[in-house]
Amino acid sequence: DTGVSQDPRHKITKRGQNVTFRCDPISEHNRLYWYRQTLGQGPEFLTYFQNEAQLEKSRLLSDRFSAERPKGSFSTLEIQRTEQGDSAMYLCASSLGAGTRLPYQETQYFGPGTRLLVL
Amino acid sequence: KQEVTQIPAALSVPEGENLVLNCSFTDSAIYNLQWFRQDPGKGLTSLLLIQSSQREQTSGRLNASLDKSSGRSTLYIAASQPGDSATYLCAVRGAGGTSYGKLTFGQGTILTVHP
């Protein structure tokens, strides 16, 4: 396994601009998660995919946020009209779930994150 | 709504000490609990995962226990080393309903081990 990769690692943008982040999960992992982490806090769940289906979205994911996983492999997270409050570390994780059964012995593997700064 | 709390928020110890990090959660309906390590500016590294039916897990100098009924977990680090310095996060995976896909994290314990 090459691990979960995220691109870019750092992004500085001006308020009002759109940004897009990419996550490549561990190959064959069918589940993919996005989290957001602000300074001094633990990560907060944003959304979750099983294969290409987006199964859960947090209330934190406002209308300006959209996530896709078109072929059940990599995923993108887009933020439109960025605000200073969007500045955070955006983390992606993947796991291997056993079909539709709820996995009780499932480890989520995290990528290095994308650090976003909105000026 | 599940809430996870970690105590202490920060801990500084001399090298060689044994130490305990605490994690508590409000909803005992969980599938599992994970302990992670996070180095500054980096992603998370999974240390231990305890299923809800288990009481503890061990990996090297790390031992994690789980008391689901009381909503508590502890991470025990034996013979601490400077390389153990990092933020330690615990996270629970909720059981059923709409929460089964996500982890709920505590705010972390910042550990510093000085030589």
Image (cartoon, coloured by chain):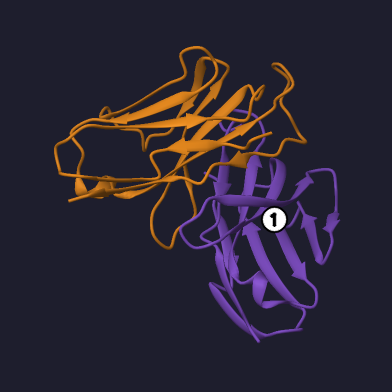
Up/down of B83 relative to B99, above or below:
below
Secondary structure of the residue carrying tag 1 is loop
Chain B colour? purple
Query: Residue B74 in the image: x percent, y percent?
Result: 73, 64
**What residue is at 64 percent from the left and 46 percent from the top?**
B92
Front-most of B28 and A14?
A14
Chain of the residue under the numbered disc 1 shown in the image: B
**What residue is at 63 percent from the left and 40 percent from the top?**
A109
**What residue is at 67 percent from the left and 22 percent from the top?**
A28
Query: Residue B9 in the image: x percent, y percent?
Result: 53, 72
Query: On the picture, is B69 further left or further right than B95?
Result: right
Q: Amino acid at mark 1?
A: Gly
**Which chain is displayed in orange in the rendered image?**
A
Q: Quadrant of residue A17?
A: top left
**What residue is at 21 percent from the left and 49 percent from the top?**
A84
Query: On the picture, is A78 further left or further right than B65?
Result: left
Q: Which residue is mark 1?
A: B71
Q: How many numbered discs?
A: 1
Quadrant placement of the N terminus of chain A = top right
Up/down of A104 relative to B68, above or below:
above
Give the farthest residue toward the front. Answer: A2
Up/down of A57 relative to B23, above or below:
above
Mark 1, Cα crowd under 10 Å, few <14 / some 14-19 / many 20+, is some
Query: Residue A12 in the image: x percent, y percent?
Result: 25, 47
